[in-house]
Image (cartoon, rainbow, N blue to C red):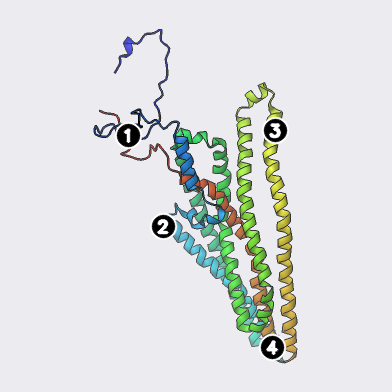
């Protein structure tokens, strides 16, 4: 090791850079340095980009449809899983309680239709409504707290792990990824992910259970009325699936473009003195507006089509109501059923089908969360060429 007192004062200080090569255990004399065919040291500072690109191509998924939502709970602890289980159970119970009011309403209507009015049936229906209200309050509160608390804990773990993984990435990886975009994704995308993992996920499960239980009640109280009303279901299912798929793709595209626009704004504001000295404010604004306009144009076009499809979905619901009331009235006029059974089946199907309209925005939020997590989890799945976090690997200094 050279002595500091023998270094010439005339030589300027130079910072020595060591090439970023593959991690080698120097303490092992048997293991040689990696060399190519010509015997030269195989430095990966130039080739790491190609290696990172290959890893990137392997890790990036085919699209949001291939990204499984359960991967968002990669960092979930046992307590998080308990919270999620409690939230699913309580929100499912809440969704099942709501269509039960159709049965209570049918029993009350039967009591009012009798001559004289059957007060025992009416009083029993009143108490049933009270019990349902109490249980719905309890299950709604517990499910909301459980999903929200679980989502907050997941976001804390996800942000910490993502930042730590980015800090341990090789510097050549940043040559292909804009650090400012990564900052925008770490702050903006995680908000969307938390929204899709929180109460929106609970609402999606709740309305799905409400739809299933509503149709079960409809088939139990009037199977033929339910079948007549269910004739419109294919149109509703196709339009809803199209909306979910389209909103997922749109969310992924918008996140990408807005992240690029955010990086432009952050870079400009971070070096405002340089921008002002070069009179480059107009260029920065043009660059930012170009990215934002690209996302705006695509979003407007997709929302126009989404509005048409959603209008078709809502119209099909009211066509279903019309068909159910007409058939139920015709059947009751012939003496084949009672008004109580008709309205119990009708309101059961109505509450179930109405939940489809409530599912759409919540499923969209869940789909947006999966789309926003696509890029972030691809970064987490990318292996680092050098990883200071791994103990027992890499170059070691001899004592």
Query: Could you tell me how far apart the alpha carbons at marks 2 and 4 are, in whole angstroms?
Result: 51 Å
Instruction: Note whether residue 222 is visible.
Output: no
**Callout 1: few (<14), some (14-19), or many (20+) C-alpha neighbours within 10 Å?**
some
Q: Is residue 14 visible in this depiction of the protein?
A: yes
The quarter of the picture where residue 237 lies is bottom right
Q: Nearer the viewer, residue 270 or 181?
A: 181
Front tag of 1 and 4:
1
CA–CA distance in space, label 1 to label 3: 47 Å
List the residue tagged with mark 4: 338
Q: Residue at x 62, y 47 (%)?
A: 253
**Which numbered disc, 2 or 3, marks the residue that appears first in the sequence?**
2
Task: Check disc 1 and report its element: helix, strand or loop.
Answer: loop
Give yes or no for contact between labels 2 and 4 (Cβ–Cβ under 8 Å).
no
Closer to the chain start, of discs 1 and 4, is: 1
The one of 23 and 352 positioned closer to us in this rendering:
23
Quadrant (top left/top right/bottom left/bottom right) for the N terminus: top left
Mark whose residue sits in front, 1 or 3: 1
- In the rendered structure, the answer to whether residue 378 lies left or right of residue 348 reads left
Helix, strand or loop for disc 2: helix
Q: Earlier in the sequence, mark 2 or mark 4?
A: 2
Residue at disc 4, secondary structure: loop
Residue 10 is marked as: none
| Rendered location of residue 337, percent (x, y) | 68, 89
Q: Which mark is residue 285?
A: 3
């Amino acid at each position: 090791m050279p002595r500091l007192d023998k270094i010439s004062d005339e030589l300027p200080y130079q910072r020595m850079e060591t090439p970023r090569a593959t991690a080698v255990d120097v303490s092992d004399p048997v293991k040689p340095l990696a060399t190519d065919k010509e015997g030269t040291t195989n430095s990966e500072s130039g080739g790491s980009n190609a290696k990172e690109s290959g890893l990137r191509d392997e890790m990036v998924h085919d699209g949001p449809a291939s990204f499984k939502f359960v991967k968002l709970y990669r960092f979930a602890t046992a307590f998080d899983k308990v919270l999620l289980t409690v939230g699913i159970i309580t929100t499912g119970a809440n969704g099942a309680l709501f269509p039960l009011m159709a049965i209570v309403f049918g029993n009350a209507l039967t009591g009012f239709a009798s001559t004289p009015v059957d007060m025992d049936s009416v009083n029993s229906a009143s108490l049933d409504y009270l019990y349902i209200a109490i249980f719905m309050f309890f299950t709604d509160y517990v499910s909301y707290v459980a999903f929200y608390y679980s989502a907050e804990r997941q976001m804390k773990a996800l942000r910490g792990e993502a930042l730590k993984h980015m800090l341990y990435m090789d510097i050549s990886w940043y040559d292909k990824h804009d650090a400012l975009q990564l900052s925008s994704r770490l702050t903006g995308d995680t908000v969307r992910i938390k929204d899709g993992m929180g109460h929106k996920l609970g609402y999606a499960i709740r309305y799905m259970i409400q739809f299933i239980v509503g149709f079960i009640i409809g088939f139990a109280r009037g199977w033929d009325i339910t079948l007549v009303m269910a004739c419109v279901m294919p149109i509703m299912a196709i339009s809803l699936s199209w909306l979910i798929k389209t909103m997922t793709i749109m969310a992924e595209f918008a996140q990408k473009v807005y992240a690029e626009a955010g990086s432009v704004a952050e870079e400009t504001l971070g070096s405002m003195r340089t921008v002002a000295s070069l009179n480059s404010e107009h260029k920065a604004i043009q660059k930012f507006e170009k990215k934002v306009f690209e996302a705006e144009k695509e979003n407007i076009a997709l929302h126009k089509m989404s509005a048409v499809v959603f209008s078709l979905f809502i119209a099909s619901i009211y066509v279903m109501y019309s068909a159910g009331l007409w058939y139920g009235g015709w059947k009751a006029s012939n003496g084949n059923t009672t008004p109580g059974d008709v309205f119990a089946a009708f309101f059961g199907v109505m509450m179930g089908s109405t939940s489809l309209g409530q599912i759409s925005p919540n499923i969209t939020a869940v789909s947006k969360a999966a789309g926003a997590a696509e890029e972030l989890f691809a970064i987490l799945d990318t292996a680092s060429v050098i990883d200071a976090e791994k103990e027992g690997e890499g170059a070691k200094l001899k004592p």
